[in-house]
Every structure is written in structure tokens, then in C-alpha cells.
Amino acid sequence: MEKYTFVDRYFHSQYELLDIRKSEERDINTLFSYLENLHATGDKLKDMFGANIKSCPEFKLLRLIRNYFHHVDDIDEIRMYVSIDKDFINSHLEHVIVPLEVYAKSIKSFIDKNTVSENNKNYQRKLDYVGNEIASIVTCCDCQSMISELPSYCDDPSVVFNDKAYSLGFDIYKFVYNVTNEISDICRSIDELAGKKVILELDNSYICKNNIPQNDLMCRASSMPVLTTEGYVFSSSV
């Protein structure tokens, strides 16, 4: 009987979420299952093997979304898009898009939950914790300007292109891809996990040195795309 099946569940849910060959198997539970399996994997790697994937910025970002999804509200939909245009190059052609509003609310929920009054003995500790977590997340996601104006991003942020309003989107593909590479490297370094079938069958691309950088979009300034819940939108006027 296969041991440490939490690893198998993680990679199964990751394949379903990211692998285009699994697109027919996706349903309303796909994103939720992935985030729950990621959370459980982080706990069990640390508890069983002392491996702390929870310090990874991508893990922290996805945990915010997981906690919002788990404790606060649903994420109504997840959309998969392939967007190609002659004026830009992206690190990946498939996108896992959720509304930017959801990401903003996830951050706000985290901050609100960990904010206490100045009279509370834990005030400074909580303040430092929130600051350190956000600073870590910013290293993998350029969202500092959004955080400084968080309330406005929590109210269905949108743009109007060519007289049509588009809700802004947030692509989590890169963060899932990167944290999966981190988990892959950790599993290979642990004797009890390195010999598991799911780890032995990983191809050579599952390695941290292949992680997608923070700025993974190249384009001409004259044709800057905006990510919406309908994919990338290009327009000469906003």
C-alpha cells in the first residue's frame, strides 16, 4: 500500500488544475481541492519531515486565497484561457484566472483577522507578522500598489476598453507552478518520499530553477495588455 498519500493527492490536484490534458476533468471543485491539498501538504511536510514549504512566498499567497475560500466566501468561477498576441510574450500560455477582487479580499481578510487594538499585548507581534507576510508575498507578486489602495480593489475593480467594461483578473498559474516545483524538490530530498511513484515519474521540468520570475510578461509599451476575467485585453484607449 502506498504511504504518504498526501503527496499523491497534491500532485493529482495540481495536474488537474494546470495540465491542459486534464481540462475535461475540471469542475467546480478543482480549485478548492487544489488549495486544500496544498494546505494539507504544507502541514504534513512540516509535521512529518520538518520541511517548511510554508516559508515559500507563493505558498503564502495561495494560502491567503485558500483561507478566504475556506472561511469567508466562495470563488464563483475559475476560467482557463490561452491568449496569444504578436506584441507580447508570456511565460505560459494557459491562465488560471480568478477575479482580482477575490485576491484583494483575501489580503484584506488576512489583515483584518490579524489586526488587534494597540492596547492588546499582541499588537506589535501581530503587526510584525502581517508586515512580514505581505513583504514576502510582494517578492513573488507585484501587488504593493494594490495593497496601498486595498478597499477600491475589493469592490469589483474594472476597466473600460472600447466602451465595454471588464472586471480585472488575477492569474494564479505562476504561483501554483512555482510552489509545485518547490514541493517537488523537497520531496526528492526526503528519502521516504523520493522513491514514491508520483515523484519518480516527475519530468525534469519540475525543479525550482525553472520557476517563473515575478515579471513574466514582455510586451511593447504601446500595446500593454490588461488581464481581465475574460483574458488579456488589448486596446489603444482606456
Image (tube, helix red, strand yellow):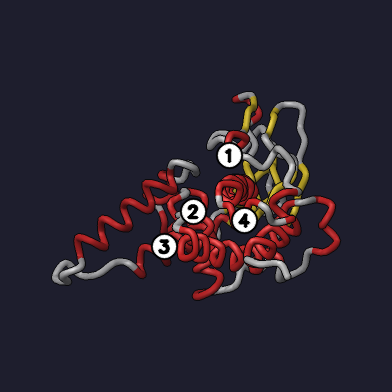
- Left or right of residue 200, residue 49 in this image: left
User: Marks 1/2: CA distance?
Assistant: 12 Å
Residue 32 % position (x, y): 64, 68
Q: Quadrant of the C terminus?
A: top right
Labels 4, 1: front one: 4
User: Marks 2/3: CA distance?
Assistant: 23 Å
User: Marks 1/3: CA distance?
Assistant: 30 Å
Q: Secondary structure at mark 1?
A: helix
Residue underneath mark 1: 208
> Relative to the observer, which residue lies in front, 214 or 112?
214
Residue type pointed to by label 2: Ile
Residue underneath mark 3: 108
Q: Residue at x 48, y 63 (%)?
A: 106
Q: Can you see residue 154? A: no
User: Marks 4/1: CA distance?
Assistant: 17 Å
Q: Residue at x 25, y 59 (%)?
A: 127
Task: Classify 10 Å Cα crowding around label 4: few (below 14), some (14-19), many (20 and above).
Answer: many
Residue 131 % position (x, y): 31, 52
Labels 2, 3: front one: 2
Labels 2, 4: front one: 4
* Displayed quadrant of residue 29: bottom right
Nearest to N terminus: mark 2 or mark 3: 2
Residue type pointed to by label 3: Lys
Residue underneath mark 2: 53
Q: Secondary structure at mark 3?
A: helix
Labelled disc at residue 172: none
User: Marks 2/4: CA distance?
Assistant: 15 Å
Nearest to N terminus: mark 1 or mark 2: 2
Residue underneath mark 4: 193
234 up-or-down from 153: above or below? above
